[in-house]
Amino acid sequence: MSASDRIIARFFASTVKQGTLEVHFEGGGTETFGTPAPGFENLSVRLREGATRQILTDPRLGAAEAFMDGKLVIEGGGIMELIHMLRANQPWDKGQRLRPPTFLRRLKDRVAHLRAATNRASSSKSNVAHHYDIGNDLYELMLDAPHMQYSCAYWPREGMTLEEAQHEKLAHIAAKLALEPGQEVLDIGCGWGGMAIFLAQKAGVRVTGITLSEEQLALARKRAEVAGVADKVSFELVDYRDLAASGRRFDRIVSVGMFEHVGQPQFETYFRAVGNLMHQDGVALIHTIGRMGQPGMTDAFTRKYIFPGGYIPALSETIAASEKVRLIASDVENLRIHYAKTLRCWYDRCMAHQSEIEAMYDPRFFRMWTFYLSGATAAFENGGMCNFQIQYIRDRRALPLSRDYISEAEKKLLA
C-alpha cells in the first residue's frame, strides 16, 4: 500500500465505525473498515487511477470531483448511501462534551466569517442564473408537480407524498401570515410561482412575486395563466433592493428559500428592505435554511458548483441583523429534519430519471447533482443544518396574542 493510500486508509479507519466499507485502493490492495450495525450501510468503494491524488490535493473538493469524474466508484449502493454512512458516524449532535473553542479555532472561524460572500446586487443575478437558469426541465422532473416547490416541505404525518408535504408547507406558511382577503402580498424570491398562486387561490389576496431568474419568471407567468389567477398574481424580474427603493408597500411579505442567497454582509440591507416594504401593521414570514450552531462558512463544493454567493445563516446572526432595523421576531420555528425527507424525495426522483437528466446535460452533471442532493441530505440528517421559519412584525399589536390563530387558519386552508 502506497503512502497516499495509507493516508486515505487512516481517514476511513477513524471515521467508519458503524456499517462496513470495503475500499479497493488505487495502488492495489483492499481493506474493510467498520462493523455491521443496524441503520448503517455495507458498501464498497473503488478508487480508480487519479482518484487518490485528486482527493489528497484538495481535501475540500477532491472526493466530490473524483466522484463526478467517475474515478471514485461506489458498489452496493450510491452516493447517498456513502455520504450517509460517513456523516452518520459523526453526527453534529452526538452528545459530546462541550468545551470552549481554542484561540486558533476562534481565529479560524473569524477569518472564515469575514471571507463570506458579499453577494452584491451587481452579482446577485449571475449567481441566481448559475443555479436556476440551467433549464426548467430538470426541476419539473425533480419537484412536486402541483406547486414546483424548491424548498423544504412540511411533514406533520408519516406516509405523506412529496406533493402532500409541499401543499402542507404552503398552508403552514400562509397561516402564519394571518391573511385577509384583498390584501397585497409580496413574494420575495418567488421561484416558479407556486406560493403566489396558492395564496391567490386559497386566501383571496393579490400577490406580486419577484425573482432574478428569467427561466423562473417565464414559467411562473405561464403557470399563473393555467391556474386562472393571472389577474391576481403578477411576477417581476427585479432585485428586492430596487423594489424597496421604489417606495412600494405591502400588507404581507413572504420569502421562501431566498434568504440563504442574500449573503451575510447584506443581512441588514435585506431586513431594512423588508421593513420598508411592509405597512406598519404588516407581517412577514422568512423561511430559510439555517445553522443550528454558530455562524460558519459555506462548504467549497456548494460555493463552486451549486450556490455561488450563497451563505447559510445561523439564527443568532439572522435575529441580530433584523433587530437593527426594529423588526420584531414574533414567532420562530425550527423544522429540524423536514428538509432531509424532502431531499430524499428529490434524490429518488432524479435517480428514477437518470437517463433523461444525462441526456439533458451529461453523466458528470448527473453525478454532481446527486452528490449535491446527498450531501445536503446528510447535513440535515446528521450535520448542523435545519430550516427556520421566522415571523416578523413592526407593530407588537399586529397579531393575536396567542398562536391559536395559526392552527385555525391552517385547517381552513387545507379544508
Image (cartoon, rainbow, N blue to C red):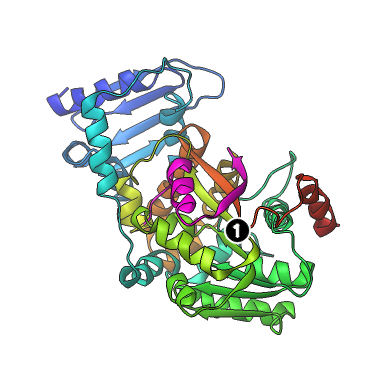
Residue at image location 48% in from the left, 80% down from the top: 246
Q: Is residue 327 left or right of residue 120?
A: right
In what element is the residue under mark 1?
Answer: loop
Rendered location of residue 406, percent (x, y) = 76, 50
The span shown in magenta is 310-336
Rendered location of residue 110, percent (x, y) = 26, 39
Q: Does the magenta segment cover residue 326?
A: yes
Residue at image location 71% in from the left, 67% down from the top: 198
Instruction: Look at the image and tell me in which quarter the C terminus lies.
Output: bottom right
Q: Which residue is outermost to the bottom?
A: 231
Quarter of the rendering containing residue 46: top left
Instruction: Look at the image and tell me in which quarter the N terminus lies.
Output: top left
Residue nearest the viewer, comparing 60 with 8: 60
Q: Is residue 118 left or right of residue 316?
A: left
Q: Does the magenta segment cover residue 195?
A: no
Q: Is residue 212 left or right of residue 407?
A: left
For label 1, the residue is 394
Residue nearest the viewer, comparing 321 with 239: 321
Quarter of the rendering containing residue 91: top left
Rendered location of residue 21, percent (x, y) = 39, 25
Residue type beneath disc 1: Arg
Rendered location of residue 177, percent (x, y) = 69, 59
Residue at image location 39% in from the left, 70% down from the top: 129
